[in-house]
Structure formats: structure tokens, C-alpha cells
Image (cartoon, grey):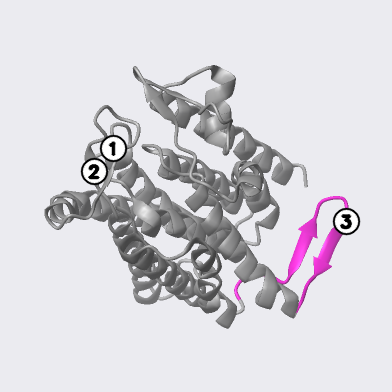
């Protein structure tokens, strides 16, 4: 029974998300909500803020899950309070992304704003204050977990995804790998509320990836990138999967370390004859580092390379969980 319900929620979320995009793509283009595809000949204009479609499907899936929990007389092991907390956090961070996509918030302000999006999770005291830390053991962080680690996790993940971006399918593709990894860990750990959040996210991400994959029909914008990070962090918190969460965020952290000395710039490539090359000034991000190492790489292969790197860390996260 539970498996059927999870499958229904996944298919419903995928379907809603998939059907929303044909509606918003022409609407966004008609209203001039577009951005230049920097890595194509002539830099064509592509509709932006596609994250709205992804979040529409995700929210619909969460509401369906809550409805099924209520009307099936609690026959499925879901915590509706946690689902509502995640919904609140994702909607708040989506609002931040919408503001940034439309009026361009200053980088320093935008970096800190996800702290406020963590308030719904903090208000319900989401997650478990006791964490298993490798080589140390169980540590109970108490109020420090709720008041510091939750907002830190949401802010770090949201900004990490937002920075490692700018190529067709990259953000959603890597996010999909991260979600699949966490879903496996959540299922094995029997953290079913987190598992449901993740399969809902997977449905929304896969449908979005169809439209965002190379050559992209729509960009997801900051409303999409920030939301992907917030969903990942929320699922990690709800499912008490902090170790797995830290591992899958490592590629984003590496990108941050490379960008930090250069004041966190965007790291576009130099397009030439179907390939992207690192600027002569040197790499200022993980994407440009891969361009430099390969001596030039197509956009699609660059994205697949980064998804492959994320897959490696995903496998490591699952193996470490199984070794407990």
C-alpha cells in the first residue's frame, strides 16, 4: 500500500511539473523574462525563472502527500508538520529567488537571505538534535542544532547550488543525482517523511530537466537554484542524514573554495566552435577548472562530467551509510 502511494505522489508531481512548463515558457518569453544563453552561437535569448514550474510541481506533490496522509486515516508513516515546515521553507526561498530574478538583489544580501527561509524548519524544531559524527560518535547539539545548524545548512546548500550554475541542465542535473542519493539513504534508514520529500523532489526535478537539458528551452533562474539547495537541506534535516548531506555537497564546496579568492564570480566559459575554454586569466570556478584540465569541452560533456563527479560522491555517501 505504501509503495503504491509513493508511486502516485511521484507520478503526480512529475505530471504537474511537466504540464506547467508549456504554459509558462511562452508567457515568460512574451513578458520579456529572458536571459542570454552565453554558451551558444549568437547568445540566443531563453526564458528564465523556470524554477517557478519546478516549485509548482513540488508544492503540489507535498500537498497531495499531506492530503493522502489525512484522508487515509494515517495509514502512511508521514509527519505532516515536517512536510508543512519544508513547504514553508521552500516557498520562502522561492520568494527570495523571484525577487533576485526580477530586481537583482546585491550578492552579499542574497547570500544571507536564505537564513530567513530556514525559520519554518526552526519553528517546528525539525530534525534530530543528536548527530552521528564519523570518528567521534553521537553528539547532542541541543538548541544549537535548531538555532544555528539548521539555518546554516539551508543557507549553505542554497548558495552552493546557486553558485555552481550557468550551464544547460547543470543545476537540475546535479540536484537530481543528490536527490537520488539521499532518497536511497532515507529509504534504507526508514526515514519515510524525508523519503517522500525526496521522491516528490525527484518527480519535479526530472520533469524540469526535460526542459532545461541541453539545448535548454528554459533557464530555472535563482528561484530554481536556491530552491534546489533548500530542498536538499530540508530533506537532510528531516531525515537526520547530515553525514550524507555533507558528502554530496562537497563538489559545491570545492567550487566555493575556488571562487572565494576571486570574490565569488560567475564562471562562464569562452565559447569557440562548439567547445568551452577556460579564460586566459585562469579558472575562477570548478567549471572553468574542468575546461582548463580538458583543454576545452562541450557544454553537454561539461555538465555530464559534473554530474559524474556528484554521482561518485553520492556513491561514497551511500557506502558510508551502509558501513555504520
Q: Nearer the viewer, mark 3 or mark 2?
A: 2
Range of residues picked out in magenta: 126-142
**Helix, strand or loop for disc 1:** loop
Q: Earlier in the sequence, mark 1 or mark 3?
A: 3
SS type, badge 2: strand
Please determine whether, in this image, residue 43 is positioned above or below residue 276. below
Q: Is residue 191 visible?
A: no
Mark sitting earlier along the chain (3/2): 2
Q: Secondary structure at mark 3?
A: loop
User: Which residue position holds label 1?
Assistant: 216
Residue 238 visible to the viewer? yes
- The label nearer to you, 1 versus 3, is 1
**Mark 3 surroundings within 10 Å by alpha-carbon count, few (fewer than 14), some (14 through 19), many (20 or more):** few
Pick whichever of labels 1 and 2 is earlier in the sequence.
2
Q: Nearer the viewer, mark 1 or mark 2?
A: 2
Q: Residue beneath label 3, please?
A: 136
Question: In the image, is residue 134 part of the stretch drawn in magenta?
Answer: yes
Q: Position of residue 11 (x, y in %)?
A: 31, 50
Q: Residue at x 49, y 65 (%)?
A: 110
Badge 1, how many Cα within 10 Å: few under 14, some, many 20+? some
State the residue in front, 251 or 109.
109
Name the residue that disc number 2 marks. 46
- Residue 274, percent across and down? 35, 19
- In the rendered structure, are the residues bearing label 1 and label 2 in contact, judged by CB atoms less than 8 Å apart? yes
**Is residue 292 highlighted in magenta?**
no
Amino acid at each position: 500500500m505504501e509503495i503504491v502511494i509513493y508511486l502516485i505522489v511521484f507520478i503526480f508531481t512529475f505530471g504537474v511539473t511537466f504540464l506547467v512548463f508549456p504554459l509558462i515558457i511562452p508567457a515568460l518569453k512574451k513578458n520579456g523574462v529572458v536571459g542570454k544563453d552565453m554558451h551558444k552561437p549568437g547568445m540566443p535569448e531563453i526564458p528564465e525563472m523556470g524554477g517557478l514550474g519546478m516549485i509548482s510541481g513540488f508544492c503540489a506533490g507535498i500537498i497531495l502527500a499531506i492530503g493522502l496522509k489525512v484522508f487515509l486515516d494515517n495509514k502512511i508513516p508521514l509527519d505532516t508538520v515536517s512536510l508543512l515546515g519544508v513547504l514553508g521553507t521552500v516557498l520562502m526561498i522561492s520568494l527570495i529567488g523571484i525577487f533576485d530574478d526580477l530586481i537583482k538583489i546585491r550578492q552579499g544580501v542574497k547570500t544571507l537571505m536564505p537564513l530567513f527561509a530556514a525559520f519554518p524548519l526552526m519553528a517546528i524544531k525539525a530534525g534530530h538534535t543528536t548527530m552521528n559524527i564519523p570518528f567521534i560518535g553521537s553528539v547532542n547539539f541541543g538548541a544549537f542544532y535548531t538555532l544555528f545548524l539548521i539555518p546554516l545548512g539551508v543557507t549553505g546548500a542554497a548558495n552552493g547550488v546557486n553558485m555552481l550554475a550557468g550551464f544547460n541542465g547543470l543545476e537540475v542535473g546535479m540536484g537530481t543525482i543528490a536527490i537520488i542519493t539521499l532518497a536511497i539513504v532515507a529509504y534504507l534508514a526508514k526515514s519515510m517523511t524525508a523519503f517522500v520529500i525526496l521522491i516528490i523532489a525527484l518527480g519535479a526535478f526530472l520533469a524540469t530537466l526535460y526542459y532545461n537539458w541541453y539545448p535548454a528551452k528554459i533557464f530555472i533562474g535563482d528561484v530554481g537554484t536556491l530552491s534546489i539547495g533548500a530542498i536538499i537541506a530540508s530533506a537532510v534535516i528531516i531525515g537526520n542524514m547530515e553525514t550524507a548531506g555533507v558528502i554530496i555537497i562537497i563538489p559545491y564546496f570545492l567550487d566555493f573554495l575556488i571562487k572565494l579568492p576571486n570574490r565569488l564570480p560567475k564562471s562562464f566559459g569562452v565559447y569557440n566552435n562548439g567547445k568551452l575554454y577556460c579564460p586566459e586569466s585562469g579558472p575562477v570556478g570548478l567549471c572553468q577548472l574542468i575546461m582548463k584540465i580538458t583543454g576545452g569541452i562541450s557544454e553537454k560533456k561539461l555538465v555530464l562530467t559534473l554530474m559524474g563527479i556528484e554521482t561518485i560522491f553520492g556513491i561514497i555517501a551511500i557506502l558510508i551509510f551502509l558501513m555504520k
